[in-house]
């Protein structure tokens, strides 16, 4: 990531909503010098050329009648303001930058990103949350019109000045502080969803599950296998478990009611047991269990692997302990506000929930022109979410060109050996890919 830039612009948009096809209804920016002094200011209502939804009007108060005679965004930036930023490198600053940047970056030359939301989380982790309103209240910034572009952008200017005066940081240092930890990871992740390229490293393990399964007799043996003793189970419960293990592709070995399974499947097996909440789960909590009222749970069943990867990398980057039970994310109630902010930021990304299979299917960049090369498919239906996230990070780290369809991984044939090495060295398993047909017509 480049940190050299010619201009600093703090920007804010009010829009028609939060979807990927949102349009601006108001824009404001402050241009700053390196000393963070305001040297230019621009603001205008913008005609989105579509009706503004009533629920959005209730947030910012901007109506169709107010913007009827206003310029479009193109007209305002290209016609009214002849200086379009297009020939310069611009440090673009906004609070929750991933929301505002897609509306502005096409008018700029090279963009250097600085998100004041991420900066606030880094410098003031103790705050109850890091919303612009909360920051303004805590530090005494005058905030006359919340959810109006000029007032919101001005709060960001005040916050940058506070950071400079309090911590002695320059804009370039603030950019360094909030950039992804691995530049290589960011570059490679551009081959998938743009959400992943905003993430940092995933090196530390998520915390162990805080839900008790002490009703099970589980032992480890010397062969890196786990032995589950289901001596007290009825036939119906055993049949249901066998069916789910089979559906997940988990290799099992039964001897009576005793199940032997590779240690690699531990998270997956435990997730099946807990998620189904069957009679085998002991409701008694041990001393290490956190009371349910102190836990926040988020159902992320429909999230794409790339989005889950971004989320976990963000959680690790902010030191937030977390736990997965199947598709359910558990965090402490104290961390709930920060987690909700992170989830909200990711979900506002214009490429949120875009399956990388769809990117493959509709790609026009030429990256997948030789589609026949992606005929090798690894299936990971038995992997838990932490394992999938670890695998995705390794693929990005190794610059493996790939795409996901559900929990099936498609890779360039030239990268099959790399993927097999990752699986053997990082997960201790060997797994041969299937040969599939992925022509443009069949997808």
Image (cartoon, rainbow, N blue to C red):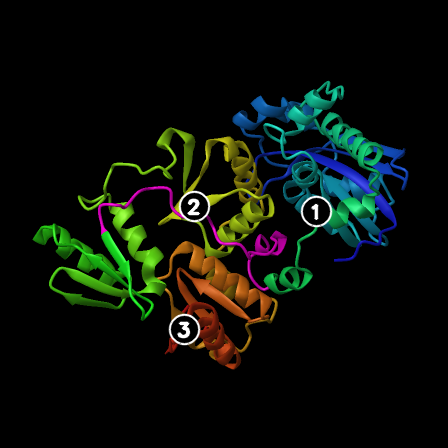
The answer for how far apart the CA atoms under marks 1 and 2 are is: 25 Å
Say which element carries label 1.
helix
Read off the residue under disc 3: 377
Task: Give the x, y percent position of residue 281.
Answer: 23, 44
The answer for how far apart the CA atoms under marks 2 and 3 are is: 29 Å
Q: Residue at x 36, y 64 (%)?
A: 264
> Do callouts 2 and 3 mark residues in contact (Cβ within 8 Å)?
no
Task: Give the x, y percent position of residue 232.
Answer: 12, 50
Q: Residues within 10 Å of mark 1 (few under 14, many from 20)?
A: many
Q: Earlier in the sequence, mark 2 or mark 3?
A: 2
Q: Earlier in the sequence, mark 3 or mark 1?
A: 1
Assign the N terminus to one quadrant of the image. Answer: bottom right
Task: Give the x, y percent position of residue 152.
Answer: 72, 28
> Can you name the residue that lies furthest to the left here?
235
Query: Which dot, 3 or 1, sits closer to the camera?
Result: 1
Q: Residues within 10 Å of mark 2 (few under 14, many from 20)?
A: some
Assign the C terminus to one quadrant of the image. Answer: bottom left
Q: Is residue 122 left or right of residue 242?
A: right
The dot on residue 178 is 1
Query: Which dot, 1 or 2, sits closer to the camera?
Result: 2
Read off the residue under disc 2: 323
27 shown above or below 137: below
> Do callouts 3 and 1 mark residues in contact (Cβ within 8 Å)?
no
Q: Residue at x 60, y 34 (%)?
A: 16
205 shown above or below 299: below
Residue 40 visible to the viewer: yes
Q: Earlier in the sequence, mark 1 or mark 2?
A: 1
Query: Which dot, 2 or 3, sits closer to the camera?
Result: 2
Region of the chain picked out in magenta, as a range? 191-216
């Amino acid at each position: 990531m480049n940190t050299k830039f010619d201009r600093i612009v703090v920007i804010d948009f009010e829009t028609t909503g939060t979807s990927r096809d949102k349009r601006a209804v108001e824009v404001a920016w402050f241009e700053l010098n390196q000393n963070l002094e305001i040297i230019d200011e621009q603001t205008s209502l913008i005609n989105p050329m579509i009706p503004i939804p009533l629920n959005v009007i209730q947030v910012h108060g901007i109506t169709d009648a107010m913007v009827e005679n206003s310029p479009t965004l193109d007209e305002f930036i290209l016609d009214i303001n002849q200086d379009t930023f297009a020939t310069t490198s611009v440090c673009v600053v906004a609070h929750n930058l991933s929301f505002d940047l897609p509306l502005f970056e096409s008018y700029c030359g090279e963009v250097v990103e600085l998100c004041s939301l991420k900066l606030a989380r880094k410098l003031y982790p103790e705050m109850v949350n890091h919303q612009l309103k909360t920051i303004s209240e805590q530090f005494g910034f005058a905030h006359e019109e919340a959810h109006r572009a000029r007032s919101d952008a001005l709060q960001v200017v005040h916050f940058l000045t506070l950071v400079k005066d309090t911590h002695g940081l320059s804009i370039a240092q603030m950019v360094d502080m909030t950039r992804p930890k691995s530049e290589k990871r960011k570059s490679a992740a551009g081959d998938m969803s743009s959400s992943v390229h905003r993430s940092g490293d995933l090196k530390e393990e998520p915390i162990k599950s805080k839900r008790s399964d002490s009703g099970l007799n589980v032992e480890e043996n010397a062969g890196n296998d786990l032995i589950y003793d289901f001596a007290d189970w009825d036939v119906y419960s055993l049949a249901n478990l066998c069916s789910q293990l089979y559906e997940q592709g988990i290799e099992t070995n039964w001897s009576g009611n005793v199940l032997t399974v590779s240690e690699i499947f531990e998270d997956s097996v435990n997730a099946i047991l807990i998620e189904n909440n069957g009679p085998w789960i002991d409701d008694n909590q041990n001393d290490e269990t956190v009371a349910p009222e102190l836990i926040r749970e988020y159902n992320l069943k429909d999230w794409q692997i790339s989005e889950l990867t971004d989320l976990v990398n963000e959680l690790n980057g902010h030191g937030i302990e977390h736990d997965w039970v199947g598709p359910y994310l558990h965090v402490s109630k104290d961390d709930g506000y920060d987690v909700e902010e992170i989830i909200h930021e990711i979900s506002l990304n214009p490429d949120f929930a875009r399956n990388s299979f769809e990117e493959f299917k509709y790609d026009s960049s030429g990256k997948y022109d030789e589609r026949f090369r992606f005929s090798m498919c690894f299936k990971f239906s038995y992997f838990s979410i932490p394992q999938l996230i670890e695998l995705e990070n390794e693929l990005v780290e190794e610059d493996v060109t790939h795409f996901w369809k559900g929990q099936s991984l498609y890779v360039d044939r030239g990268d099959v050996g790399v993927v097999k090495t990752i699986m053997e060295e990082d997960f201790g398993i060997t797994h041969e890919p299937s040969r599939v047909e992925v022509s443009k017509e069949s997808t």
